[in-house]
Image: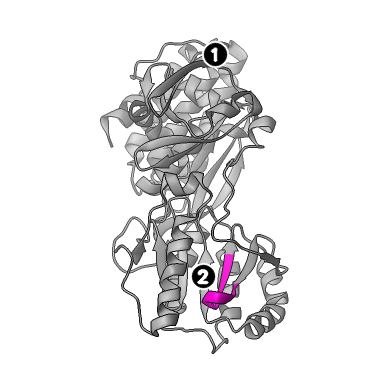
Amino acid sequence: MSQRVKALLLGCCAMHVTAAPLNEAELQAWTTDIDFYAEQVKARHIHPFHTMTEEDFKHNIEALKVELPRLSEAQVETRLMAISRAIGDGHSNYLMMSGPHQHFPFRFKFFGGTLKVVDATAEHHELIGTQLHSINGLSVAELFTQLAPVLPGVDNQFSEHSSFEYYLSLHKLLVGLGIVEQGRPASFHFIEGKGAKTLQVSPVSMREFGKLSSAYSRVEPKLTKQDIGMPGITLSLLGSQKAAYFDFASYPAPEQVMSHCDALQTTLRSAGSRYLIIDFRGNSGGNFYSGLALSACLQPLDQIDWMQGVYVLTDGATFSAAMSNTAQFRQILNAQVVGTPTGGDPNHFAENSQFLMPNSGRRFTLSKRYYPFIAEQSDAVYPDIYIEPSWDDYRHGKDTVLTELLVRLNGMLITGKTVPALAE
């Protein structure tokens, strides 16, 4: 366990207290909730001490309870996030957003080591495309160091970066870490080219923040999406490449996949599709049996090039069931993985149960299954063909990964041979 994690768990890190400490009734309520949390971790997690020892867990819980009179609610919740993170798997998380919360009005995305603003509320629309330099004087690297020990949904360094992109906007978490102050705007410093801009920014409601995703629309390659009756999955037929592109954004129920299988097979046979592209980028998971149902539906199509014609696209947000299906499709569909490494660990604790704290009403999750999907030790599913999106492509609406893969397929159609990997 790193010194930073230990310091946060033990309450030793330097934080300026800016929110009111708990009153007597709140102290009692949180004490009961913390005890409930600890009991559930020990009783309901399939293997709670696979990373953190039981002794360390007990010590961290007791230290938190001792320090409760000096802590604000935001600090208590941040400490619970840190304890959950120290359990060591991405499906065991304290859910701060299950209670009242606000967000700073930006969505961020890493390109290399640069954190870009990819969406913002109308008031800050001019900041889209700029680089975040710092918040209250802390650089992005320093912010990452502060947030990393508490981030939920983390299996590896790739999901850690993906989680940071999102949770950097969570106002209550930044209050709990002492990065910003309750009731006061924060100083955000942005860079654009050779210019810079510093603004005092206040948080907005979750409803307003929830409208944000990305201001950049994909325009290349041009896709015509079809509804195939499988909610969360769309199909685009790319005739010149004889490819069927599945945008697998979220998971339908297995029966929804199976009930529309015959119609999908008819569509692909009529189109003469030879290549399959299944896109799990940005997919945080669901029921992996739905993915297996899709693979079972596709497998009878003898027209597909099952030796070198199936591709799965991944990135750091490919997590849980989407990561599982990626590993499975590499085996059962002979698929090549394209893009960047998954945020999920192929040998991972999963299938979490959710619990409600009796007083605060806050929620947390605990893993109840373990899936070893590959024989060797690894922290991610690493791509066979590594292609990293570029900022220049992204801001112009060009999907770097898909575009370069289609170039590869064009070469295969022209030459009838396997084209060397673009970037191994």
Distance from label 1 to label 2 (Cα)? 45 Å
Left or right? Give the position of 354 relative to 9: right
Q: Is residue 25 visible?
A: yes
Assign a secondary structure to mark 1: loop
Kind of residue at badge 2: Ile
- As drawn, 419 above or below 176: below
| Left or right of 292 on screen, residue 329 | left
Q: Nearer the viewer, residue 339 or 172?
A: 339
Residue 243 part of the magenta-drawn span:
yes
Identified at 54% across, 32% down, the residue is: 128
According to the picture, the residue beneath numbered tag 1 turns out to be: 185
Image location (x, y in percent) of residue 232: 65, 60
Left or right: where does residue 1 sit relative to residue 316?
left
Q: Nearer the viewer, residue 325 or 197?
A: 197
Q: Secondary structure at mark 2?
A: strand
Mark 1: amino acid: Pro
Q: Which residue is mark 2?
A: 277
Q: Pointer 2: residues within 10 angstroms few (<14), some, or many (20+)? A: many
Image height of 406 relative to 120, above or below: below
Q: In the displayed structure, would residue 129 be above or below residue 203?
A: below
Segment colored magenta: 238-246
Question: Residue at 41% of width from left, 79% of height from top?
Answer: 412
Mark 1 and mark 2 lie on one chain; the one further toward the N terminus is: 1
